[in-house]
Amino acid sequence: MALHLSQRPRRNRKNEVIRSLVRENHVTVNDLIFPMFLNPGTNNQSEVGSMPGIYRLSLDLMLKEIESCMHLGIKAFDIFPNIPESQKDATATEGLRPDGLYPSALRAIKQRFPEAVIMTDVALDPYSSEGHDGLVRNGEIINDETVDLLAKMAVLQAEAGADIIGPSDMMDGRVGAIRTALDEAGFTHVSIMSYTAKYASAFYGPFRDALSSAPKHGDKKTYQMDPANGREALIEAALDEQEGADFLMVKPALSYLDVIAALHDYSALPIAAYNVSGEYAMVKAAAAKGWIDGDRVRDEILLSMKRAGASVILTYFAKEFAMSQK
Ligand code: PBG
């Protein structure tokens, strides 16, 4: 005997056409930024051991990779430099050298693909012998002097053609200082995607393998956020809005979907989610063991970030996702 139900939610799930009509969220290649690792030299590629399918690429190979991604519809890239240990020092000098590996490559990429959107990383850790995002003195991370360097680094990257500056350092006041420095140098059109709520997370392990950038001592807990805190992200968001950020990013993403949702409610700025290296590695490892269907888990994870409120997703899955859509 039929139940008398005023609502039967299953009616909206009864076939794929109806499911498509009522589907609330979609992931498309337009939502994605592909993070890439830049190697020195030429014809120099090395797979990141903890990130199967992800390679550090020298400029010549990266240009080819960007070209193939552009054909697949990926048009935004976030580039991180893999600086040889011998060029790292306590004050991250290499990060401020106009003809260093990173700015030189950015110029070449932008010249070759003017229509691509290039996002850059602002922080000291790729260039620091300490493996910290800021200057270290007596074991402490010095905020204000670091911010001076970050602002200079941002201007250098803008000169090299960056479209979006990504401060990933979590120093106080850096978004405002970078905005002012960019504007004074004539780069009013260059955007800032602030790492607004970046947590002191174990999910960054494979990224630190990729760049050999793990802290040599201590941890990042005096500048990156405590994973226990959600409301504190609203303080960071308010500051970043006042200081002139164009996007607010949450990182990592998967264990912080509540923070993505909170920032989406709180701010009218676009929200970005960084689907970090450890999140990628877990999926790849479990899929390799045959324990999960990696492609479906990937798509479900990306969708969860959209559903939580992200309009932009930085993900190492970008290229394979784009290939799966063809
Ligand atoms: C450092 C930086 C990190 C990531 C991006 N920029 C690691 C860290 O803070 O130690 C992590 C990205 C990832 O895990 O995918 N400025």
Image (cartoon, rainbow, N blue to C red):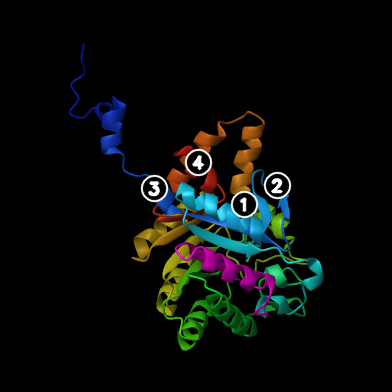
Circles 2 and 1: CB atoms closer than 8 Å: yes
Is disc 2 placed on a helix, strand or loop? loop
Label 2 environment density (alpha carbons within 10 Å; few <14, some 14–19, many ≥20): some
The mark lying in front, picked from 2 and 4, is 4
Q: Residue furthest front?
A: 112
Q: Position of residue 188 (x, y in %)?
A: 42, 81
Question: Is 153 situated left or right of 82 in this image?
Answer: left
Q: Marks 1 and 4, how far apart in space?
A: 20 Å
Q: Marks 2 and 1, how far apart in space?
A: 9 Å
Q: Marks 3 and 2, how far apart in space?
A: 28 Å
Identified by mark 3, the residue type is Arg
Identified by mark 4, the residue type is Met
Task: List the residue tagged with mark 4.
Answer: 323
Identified by mark 2, the residue type is Ser
Q: Quadrant of residue 78?
A: bottom right
Is disc 4 placed on a helix, strand or loop? helix
> Which quadrant of the rendered structure holds the N terminus?
top left
Q: Earlier in the sequence, mark 3 or mark 2?
A: 2
Question: Is 22 situated left or right of 304 in this image?
Answer: left
Span of residues in magenta: 97-124
Q: Earlier in the sequence, mark 1 or mark 4?
A: 1
The residue at 71%/76% (across/down) is 94
Q: Residue furthest bottom?
A: 184
Task: Check residue 138 for magenta coloring.
Answer: no
- Within 8 Å of ligand 1, the CB of disc 1? yes
Task: List the residue tagged with mark 1.
Answer: 277
Which numbered marker is on residue 50?
A: 2
